Amino acid sequence: MRLAAAAYPLDAFDTWDALVAKWTAWVEDAVAGGADLLVFPEYGAMELAALDGAAVVGDLEASLTSAAARLSDMQDVFAGLAVARGVHILTPSGPAWPDGASRPVNRAVLCTPDGTRGYQDKQIMTRFERETWDVTAGDPLQVFETRLGRIGVLICYDSEFPLLARALIEGGVDILLVPSCTDTLAGYWRVRVGAMARALEGQCVVVQSPTVGDAPWSPAVDENVGAAAIYGPPDLGFPPTGVLAEGALNAPGWVMGDVTLDQIRAVRDGGHVFNRAHWPEQENRTQTVISRCLF
């Protein structure tokens, strides 16, 4: 299969048609490159708030409400593109307001070529989401059964927590998708290091899709730093760096890489190390911690 990670710049459009045209052009570009699975970034859906004008998109709370109100319409567009082009698409994540919820969650939707779709909510909130935006954790982790294999999603900060990934790996996941939105180089590297570590531990493939470039019209996503990439375990059948493909920092566009499920199975069954299989041994080795003072 060919995996495609978007390094996605955020734009402020005046009309819905212009925004749909952007999404369509991005999908068409990836399809032309032979992509089977397209991954868009975290909070890419904040573009929706710009449709309500500068006053709304420039206000944190109003922009949340605005983007949430149009999120399902955006997902319908991507679902239609997935069916029309015969591809899987992880939509840009954005604020969703579940029925009865007092605050929004951060939700991405996986659309398939047969028209089915499922969603993944972010599990662990960053300080900005907790302390400033009041975005909350949503529904539990999901394992998506697709014709490409079992897919899991860890939204940005979630990729920095190994037990979340481990739960998905134990659920049979072969490919982890990591949509991200980071406003500093350090933030980008935290997510990248987390994504690469998850590929090592789970002996799986991880796809990171970031927002890139400045969006001064939105205080929520005004600065964006990142590089799209696809990672695997640095072992049998994969590059020694663990990097299958990567783009330049802050360079908009698609980054693509090819992988097979047989390639993932081979490294799990015959690699030089068995991180995935040996994971449970940690439990026995951490029951007792000896404290010693050395003089």
Image (tube, rainbow, N blue to C red):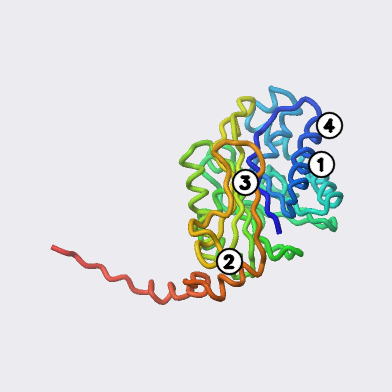
Q: Which residue is mark 4?
A: 17
Observer-nearest residue: 250 or 112?
250
Q: CA distance from mark 4 to mark 1?
A: 12 Å
The C terminus, quarter of image? bottom left
Mark sitting on residue 73: 1
Residue at horizontal 77 percent and vertical 47 percent from the top: 31
Q: Quadrant of residue 284?
A: bottom left
Give the distance between the C-alpha atoms of the residues marked 1 and 3, in whole angstroms.
22 Å
Residue 217 pos. (x, y %): 64, 25
Q: Residues within 10 Å of mark 1 (few under 14, many from 20)?
A: few
Q: Kindly identify the residue that appears in the image at 76 percent across and 54 percent down.
A: 88
**Which amino acid, by three-letter code, is at mark 3?**
Ser
Q: Is residue 55 above or below residue 118?
A: above
Where does residue 102 sit, x and y in percent of width and height? 67, 45
Q: CA distance from mark 3 to mark 2?
A: 22 Å
Nearer-the-camera pick, 288 or 203: 203
Residue picked out by circle 2: 167
Regarding mark 4 in the picture, which secondary structure is present there?
Answer: helix
Earlier-in-chain disc, 3 versus 2: 2
